[in-house]
Amino acid sequence: MSQRNKVPGVRPYDGPAGGWGALKATAQAVRRQMDVVEAPGLLLRTNQPAGFDCPGCAWPDKEHRSTFQFCENGAKAVTWEATSKRVTPEFFQQHTVSSLLELPDFDLENFGRLTHPMAYDAATDKFLPVPWETAFARIGEALRGLDSPDEAEFYTSGRASNEAAYLFQLFARELGTNNFPDCSNMCHEATSVGLPQSIGIGKGTVSLEDFDLTDFVISIGHNPGTNHPRMMGTLHEVARRKVPIIVFNPLRERALERFADPQNVAEMATYGSTDIASSYYQVKAGGDVAALKGIMKALLALDARDGGALDHAFIAEHTLGFDALAADLAATGWDDIERESGLKRADLERVAGAYAKSTAAIVTYGMGITQHNTGTANVKLIADLLLLRGNIGKPGAGICPLRGHSNVQGNRTVGITEKPGADFLRRLEEVFGFTPPREHGHDAVQAMQAMVRGTAKALICLGGNLAVAMPDPELCFTAMKRLRLSVHLGTKLNRSHLLVGEETFLLPVLGRTEIDLQAGGPQSVTVEDSMSMVHASAGKLKPASEFLRSEAAIIAGMARATLPDSKVDWLELIDDYDRIRDLIERTIPGFDDYNRRIRVPGGFRMPLPATGRTWNTPSGKAEFSVFPGVRERYEPWPDDVLRLVTIRSHDQYNTTIYSLDDRYRGVFGRRDVLFMNAEDLAAHGLAHGDRVDIETVSSSRRLRLENITAIEYNIARGSVAAYYPEANVLVPLDYIDKECGTPSYKSIPVRIRRAGARAAVT
């Protein structure tokens, strides 16, 4: 990094990811949030068969048990939830909502756990305690008073359990709406939409065992050291077997370069580390289409020249559309591929050559692939690349989308979708005796657009921080304040809770770490990880307050108060969650013998037909896709336009910010920075440490982020990066992948100018 200017809070970090730095950060997180005597026992129960599922990432648990099954960021998630800090009615008496809105997001969540149900009082601008039954009655009255059930939006966070999510969708559908904005709409919706078109199911096809058997891995568009940290142990094992790991990412990320496993005694004792990436290619933001097509074009040329690069037998027996793909690749020029990807032809040919020599390959990808205008196309092109060599449906091979929240995939499996299938709705009708709505509902962007228009009047949030997670806060914040009813189930205070409408309720929930005691005794919930394993989770801590209720119990309370004629015995279901799981089993395929199987350590795997080369597509075969050209947009941007990528810091999980440090990128105590390539800085007449304004290239609205410090960083030329959610002010609400509706957080066209400089009239 250039040292022409010393920038406060910005300094090189030379250590590996993980290692002693991770252990130190874990100890600091424990010390700041909870009792240091209680913490070790709690952490050692994380992701264990008789313990609770980490509320962080969705990477699966090892079946061969190690000393511990948590990582640095998992420890932060656990201690953040199990904190000894409390937000009581006395706290709200001391703070108006207006004063709380002035505080940073970090401070809001750092106040601690919510302890009582609260209702907003406009006269005092404060939240006041409210009895549970009174809250339920008022919520039910407001929902029944809507002109149409479709005026309500039911948002789900990926931390909700299968049981809570199932009751949530049942409640909304009996009310009469399929409006299910969901956190997956903002992350892996491209996977849910794209993969069924390619292989017949919207989930990954690999297991942890496949990583033991693979001999080639492509990692594209993700930073596992921060966003999927337990994956680093798996990548560490793969790298130590000398398996090639090819990385495509605009930024150099430390965890993809060097990692020291805290459970590896030799590495810890010698302060050593393991190189993760065997090759690292810094593709331009928005250049994934071009890079993937370049690899495939080179692969086809290699097969034509030497043979053996394609699995022609697999292609003939199991696929459709190969000829159209081959023709498109032949018509795609290398000049266009190099320009749009930012990579050299020789590099892409080198990747194709290494891939052709492998016998079993895995491609892992994250939101750097999905959060684009072409996110769905990106996913289908990855499937194309794997299908060319028969790398789906055999040991050691497959596609591996990296989900974020611990149960974002499970929520979808149990019915949280705005586009429900006819068979699922038919089963609901048969089992519950009501006619669920058939019309598709709203996804996250559509729900927020309905709030902006004023056609959505009520919002029920099962966790999450919706307004902060969404693009364009100027529009979203204002829209949420106009709601007739807003209800938030949560563990800790966040900004969305403070965007109060006519009636707003904060309903405090039990966390994953806490005992869920119902009439039938202590309860377990279940979750589904990124590899379709469903397993149980049972908290062990005393609840943070005697007034907390489980998510499932709160949903049942709201449903019972809203639907007085319901045939569902909501309260009986809460007495024993086995009864909820019995209903899931009756209405959703794959959950056979549910209650018995979740009592087996490790749980069970949901059906994945593609792993057996059964393709549930309309044709009955895996289908190649064709993406014309290589640009995310069909018209080129002017030369002065850069692509902005929004990123999470290492001390962050989605919208939750644990501290203001980003250790591996060398940023400490601040988040107001813009990561820029040295040549881009020079081309803009800027130096490391200069203050800049960022403006989105948009024909609809003027979106700006002002007075940000530009710092030199190893990032692809033409790409810049800034922290999420602060940079959401630059993302238009309608700047989305039209196929799946996901906002394009990872390729925003922007112009950079010195702070205060006047924009040229164009």
Image: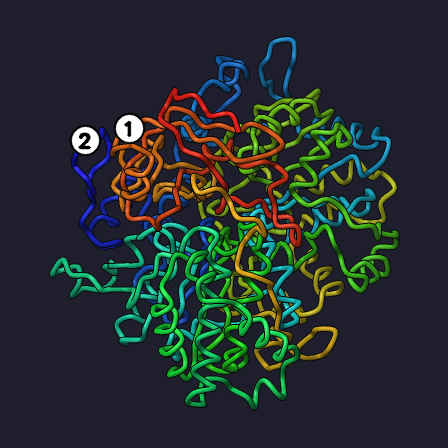
Q: Nearer the viewer, residue 620 or 569?
A: 620
Q: Is residue 360 above or below residue 66?
A: below
Residue 438: image x %, image y %? Answer: 84, 53
Specify the quadrant of the image occupied by residue 623.
bottom right
Q: Is residue 30 above or below residue 43?
A: above
Mark 1, other Cα within 10 Å: few <14 / some 14–19 / many ≥20: some
What is the three-letter code of the residue carrying label 2?
Asn
Residue 100: image x %, image y %? Answer: 49, 18
State the residue position of label 2.
5
State the residue position of label 1.
690
Specify the quadrant of the image occupied by residue 499.
top right
Query: Does residue 517 show up?
Result: no
Quadrant of the rendering where the N terminus is positioned: top left
Mark 2, other Cα within 10 Å: few <14 / some 14–19 / many ≥20: few
What is the three-letter code of the residue carrying label 1?
Asp
Colour setting:
rainbow
Query: Does residue 95 show up?
Result: yes
User: Closer to the N terminus: mark 1 or mark 2?
Assistant: 2
- In the image, 49: left or right of 325? left
Q: CA distance from mark 1 to mark 2?
A: 9 Å
Q: Image point 31% across, 52% down: which residue? A: 253
